Image (spheres, helix red, strand yellow):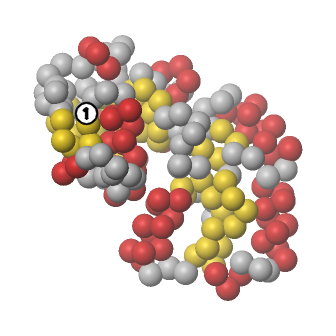
Amino acid sequence: NGFQHTPYFDQQNKDRGLSLVAVGGRTVLLPMAGYSHKYKSLGELPEGAQISIPNDPSNAGRALKLLEAGGVLKLTPGVTFNATELDIVDNPKKVKIIPMETAQLPRSLEDVDFSVITSHFALSAGLVPSRDAILIEDQLSDYFCLLAVAEKNKDAPWVQTLIESYKSPDVKAFIEKKFGGNIIAGW
């Protein structure tokens, strides 16, 4: 498969006892971004603002790191993608973090002040990160997706064919044309 970023991949392998391996390096980045139907900037968020984030551990930590990058809160120094709400060490606006199922995040925009959503769910809901996001993850992200195969297949000839096909100039051109920079090819 090719839909997961490294922290999610690592967490799923651990939690589910899978024996998947990453092959071929980075594929695409689906940047995580923050949106609001009520406010046009992070500075407008009121005290006690409700912020919805993904409820799966790797994307929740990613969302918290993005909120930290935007100056909304501060996390324990050195914490990475595994950040949780317990790692919030400074919350000047006393924002309330509301974890929820990732697919529900775009719908939550009617009820919360701000929501942190990955690009594929945002795009599916008609949100365009480059146009609609107030806060967006940079392209230096550790969250590029990867291709994963069963460990027993990692050296199979078809895997190299898959990698070469996926990372072709034609696929890169398609991604750039179809998604206009909202999904980024990593090769």
What percent of the width, then of the height, locates residue 32? 47, 39
Amino acid tagged 1: Leu
Tell me the quadrant of the picture where the N terminus can be found. Answer: bottom right
Viewer-nearest residue: 116 or 24: 24
Residue at image point 63% right, 68% down: 22
Q: Quadrant of residue 96?
A: top left
Viewer-nearest residue: 103 or 132: 132
Which SS class for mark 1? loop
From this viewpoint, is residue 102 visible? no
**Disc 1: which residue:** 73
Task: From the viewer's perspective, tell me whether residue 32 is left or right of residue 147.
Answer: left
Residue at image point 53% right, 49% down: 143
What is the total number of numbered labels drawn onto the structure image?
A: 1
Q: Residue furthest front?
A: 77
Viewer-nearest residue: 120 or 82: 82
Task: From the viewer's perspective, tell me whether residue 149 is left or right of residue 94.
Answer: right
Q: Would you call the spot at circle 1 few (<14 residues within 10 Å), some (14-19), or many (20 or more)?
A: some
Residue at image point 48% right, 21% down: 132
What percent of the width, then of the height, locates residue 61? 35, 50
Q: Quadrant of residue 177?
A: top right
From this viewpoint, is residue 59 visible? yes
What percent of the width, then of the height, locates residue 6? 53, 59
